[in-house]
Amino acid sequence: MWDGAFYRVQRKGYEICFVPDAGVPLDEMDDVDMWVIFDKGERWSGTIYTLDVVHRDMDRWRETGECLGGRFFSVWDGLIVRDRGIPGMVDVVDDLVRSGDHRSVFRDVGPQETDA
């Protein structure tokens, strides 16, 4: 469901919060920042890219000289998926949460701060 600039997907015990680009349909999203927020306050962040985005960026860097002329792609909390679209990305994140692998893919950003 939309919540201002955020697109939130509620799950049992957690939610996935995406920050989609304005004007891009959810099923065409190919590069998006996101968080997994657990009901107990634990939060993990990451960026999800498609293979096409990685390929496009590396081709551009070949021209600009970035990343050794496009010879590598590196991101600390990045996840590369085959297909674009929030629905498929949700499936992947759900699987990572189920397996516990979200802990090695995404960045632990600590508990959500509450107003005292």
Image (spheres, rainbow, N blue to C red):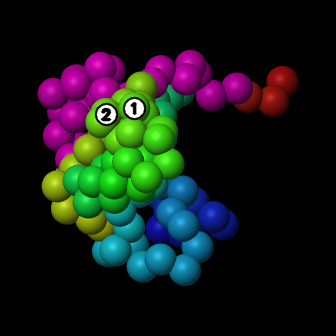
Which label number is shown at residue 95? none
Question: Of tags 2 and 1, which is closer to the observer?
Answer: 1
The magenta region covers 92-113
Residue 109 position within the rendered picture, expressed as x and y whole percent measured from the top left? 55, 23
Q: Is disc 1 placed on a helix, strand or loop?
A: helix
The residue positioned 43% from the left and 52% from the top of the image is: 63
In the rendered image, which residue does mark 2 sit on?
Answer: 72
Q: Secondary structure at mark 2?
A: loop
What amino acid type should be assigned to the residue bearing mark 1?
Leu
Q: Is residue 9 magenta?
A: no
What's the CA distance linking mark 2 and mark 1?
7 Å
* Membership of 108 in magenta stretch: yes
Whether residues under marks 2 and 1 lie with C-beta atoms below 8 angstroms apart, the answer is yes
Is 38 or 6 nearer to us in this picture? 6
Q: Return the x and y of residue 23 as percentages of the image width and height.
A: 55, 80
Mark 1 nearby-residue class (10 Å; few <14, some 14–19, many ≥20): few
Q: Can see residue 6? A: yes
**Residue at the spot of label 1:** 68
Quadrant of the image occupied by residue 96: top left
